[in-house]
């Protein structure tokens, strides 16, 4: 995947990134002006020259992401023995100015686990909104194109996941995703809730069910080692 494809993928998933461009290259440099790379929270795509130059750019880009910065900035690095470096020497003899452009797609993401009558109706409502909508079910028949036809044409970008073990999808969802657990099986709901609560960066986690179901789940969560804090009802 090149940086253009990765940029589209991040946008579709509602994830932030930083586009790094060689704005100016003077003397001997590993890449020419115009070379680009994309930096995400966990991956990078393409290259602006490797070595200390690139490692410094990636570190700075991720600092911008962590701080939620929106303004672009310039970073100039000299490629000589005497230049400060944290990631090894680069002795090309030139100088490179990089343009770092953060983009915070900030498109909300919602994951609906369970495409039964309640989950599908919720997904239908959400499909009208400008967000990334993930619909997950362990039953392939629930995700048949004819059932999901009402979700077509809305403002949301729809991602359909058939997952016999639904909690495996959690690893593919971006930080800040809002989870809604509406499966047909209380055992699936319980496994999803346990897995979800082991990762702290969700936007929110919601579970459908009666007060009796919730009371049982709280006991199960405590037995699995989750803190016994007051849970919202």
Image (cartoon, rainbow, N blue to C red):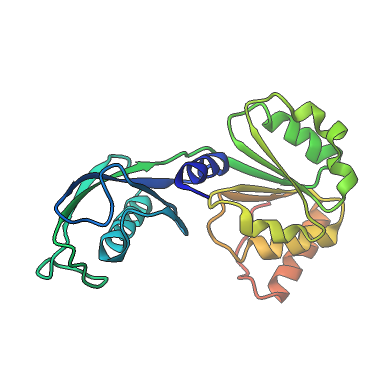
Q: Nearer the viewer, residue 9 or 131?
A: 9
User: What residue is at 64 percent from the left and 71 percent from the top?
Assistant: 226
Furthest residue in direction left, as rendered? 82
The relative height of residue 122 versus residue 93 in the rendered view (above or below) is: above
Residue 29 coordinates in the image, percent (x, y): 21, 56
Q: Nearer the viewer, residue 33 or 16?
A: 33
Furthest residue in direction top, as rendered? 153
User: What residue is at 87 percent from the left and 43 percent from the top?
Assistant: 142
Q: Nearer the viewer, residue 84 or 221?
A: 84
User: What residue is at 48 percent from the left and 48 percent from the top?
Assistant: 2
Residue 92 coordinates in the image, percent (x, y): 18, 63
User: What residue is at 58 percent from the left and 30 percent from the top?
Assistant: 130
Number of numbered markers: 0
- Residue 33 occupies quadrant: top left
Residue 138 falls left or right of residue 42: right
Residue 55 coordinates in the image, percent (x, y): 31, 63
Residue 61 coordinates in the image, percent (x, y): 33, 53
Residue 122 falls left or right of residue 31: right
Furthest residue in direction right, as rendered? 141
């Amino acid at each position: 995947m090149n940086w253009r494809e990765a940029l589209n993928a991040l946008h579709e998933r509602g994830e932030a990134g930083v586009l790094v461009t060689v704005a100016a290259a003077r003397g001997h440099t590993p890449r020419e002006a115009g070379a680009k790379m994309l930096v995400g929270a966990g991956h990078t795509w393409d290259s602006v020259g490797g070595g200390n130059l690139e490692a410094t750019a990636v570190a700075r880009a991720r600092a911008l992401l962590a701080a939620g910065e929106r303004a672009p900035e310039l970073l100039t690095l000299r490629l000589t023995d005497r230049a400060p470096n944290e990631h090894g020497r680069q002795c090309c003899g030139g100088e490179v100015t990089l343009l770092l452009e953060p983009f915070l797609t900030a498109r909300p993401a919602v994951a609906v686990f369970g495409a039964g009558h309640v989950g599908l109706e919720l997904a239908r409502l959400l499909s009208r909104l400008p967000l990334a909508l993930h619909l997950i079910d362990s039953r392939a028949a629930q995700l048949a194109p004819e059932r999901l036809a009402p979700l077509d044409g809305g403002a949301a970008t729809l991602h359909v996941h058939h997952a016999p073990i639904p909690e495996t999808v959690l690893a593919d969802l971006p930080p800040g995703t809002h989870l809604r657990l509406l499966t047909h099986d209380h055992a699936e709901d319980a496994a999803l809730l346990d897995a979800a609560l082991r990762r702290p960066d969700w936007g929110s986690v919601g579970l459908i069910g009666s007060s009796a179901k919730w009371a049982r789940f709280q006991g199960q969560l405590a037995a699995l080692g989750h803190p016994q804090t007051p849970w919202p009802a």
